[in-house]
Amino acid sequence: MAVSAADVKRLRELTGAGMLDCKKALDEAAGDFDKAVELLRIKGAKDVGKREARTASNGLVAAHLAATDHGVLLELACETDFVAKTEGFQGLAADVASFVAANDPEDLDSLLAAAYDAGRTVRDLLAEANSAMGEKIEIRRFTQVKDGYIYVYLHKHDPALPPSVGALVQLDKVNEEVAKNVAQHIAAMSPKYLDAEDVPADVVAAERRIAEETALEEGKPAAAIQKIVEGRTRGFYKDFCLVDQPWVRDNKKTIGAYLRENDVKVVKFARFKVGQA
């Protein structure tokens, strides 16, 4: 029987499989929709191994707040935007983020090995998603924070797609407005460190060395080199340390000054962006 474009579209939206694969499955199933779904699952299971070498560069950032003092941020990756915006993929991300909050895995390996339900690990759950959706699906990373006051902000770069950036901030006391403003700043300005003390010594040494060699290359006088190095190191802190960054909503004050005005401190933060380390 003839397969309609509407059936192909419906099957693709349900399974996340490619358009051509959906048409072939419907042809083989003689238009039987349930049989076509089954055929795609079988084909997907056979192809899981082939997908291992493919790149999962799309996806979403999901969050779960078990309470105001326990938050999880997680990146789930896939190959295409099409799969990223499906209910099945987004539901999987939400389920795994909730599972992290409930089970407290130490790292990604222990998360994948954890028993998700009777007879299935989280790794098995991902393998089933690989099979059903026809793409490489993987958990790229997660973090969780407990205690204090925790706020999570998720940002969509495209309203048609799920969040691609997530920021989690932990304050030493409850202040929702400050937490929201700081989380949005983190999402926008991508700081790497909390403050100067948080920057690893080898990173500081490398920045100072580069600043000195650059100044020498520029022909700066020897007497001015140390002052130039100090200035450029402060510039590095301003670019990459949260408390030293100018607040994105008022660049006349730093995040540190904004926090002091409100008598709160950031204890910890995290920022995930899809496809970015």
Image (cartoon, rainbow, N blue to C red):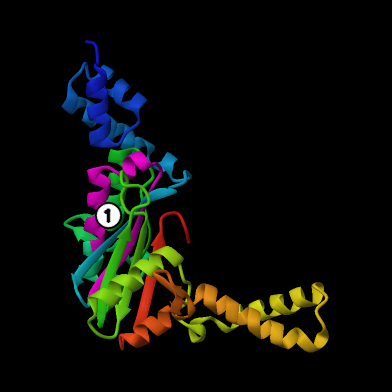
In the image, 6 versus 257, the foreground residue is 257
Please identify the quarter of the rendering in which residue 4 is found. Answer: top left
Task: Look at 21% across and 16% down and name the residue there.
Answer: 30
Q: Position of residue 218 (x, y in %)?
A: 80, 72
Task: Look at 21% across and 63% down and name the residue there.
Answer: 98
Task: Look at 42% across and 83% down and name the residue there.
Answer: 256
Task: Look at 34% across and 39% down and name the residue there.
Answer: 82
Instruction: State the SS at label 1.
Output: helix
**Residue 9 visible in the current orientation:** yes
Q: Position of residue 93 (x, y in %)?
A: 27, 54
**Residue 41 is one of the magenta-drawn residues:** no
Query: Which amino acid type is marked by label 1?
Result: Ala
**In the drawing, does residue 134 fall left or right of residue 246?**
left
- The residue carrying pointer 1 sits among few (fewer than 14), some (14 to 19) or many (20 or more) residues within 10 Å by Cα, namely many
Q: For mark 1, what is the residue?
A: 93
Name above or below for residue 262 compared with residue 118.
below
Q: Which residues are magenta?
A: 70-97
Q: Position of residue 74 (x, y in %)?
A: 33, 62
**Residue 106 visible in the current orientation:** no
**In the drawing, does residue 61 fall left or right of residue 190?**
left
- Which of the image's four quarters has the N terminus? top left
Name above or below for residue 173 compared with residue 57.
below
**In the drawing, does residue 180 fall left or right of residue 274?**
left
**In the drawing, does residue 168 fall left or right of residue 69?**
right
In the image, 229 versus 95, the foreground residue is 229
Please identify the quarter of the rendering in which residue 101 is found. Answer: bottom left
Please identify the quarter of the rendering in which residue 34 is found. Answer: top left
**Residue 71 is one of the magenta-drawn residues:** yes
Q: Position of residue 216 (x, y in %)?
A: 80, 77
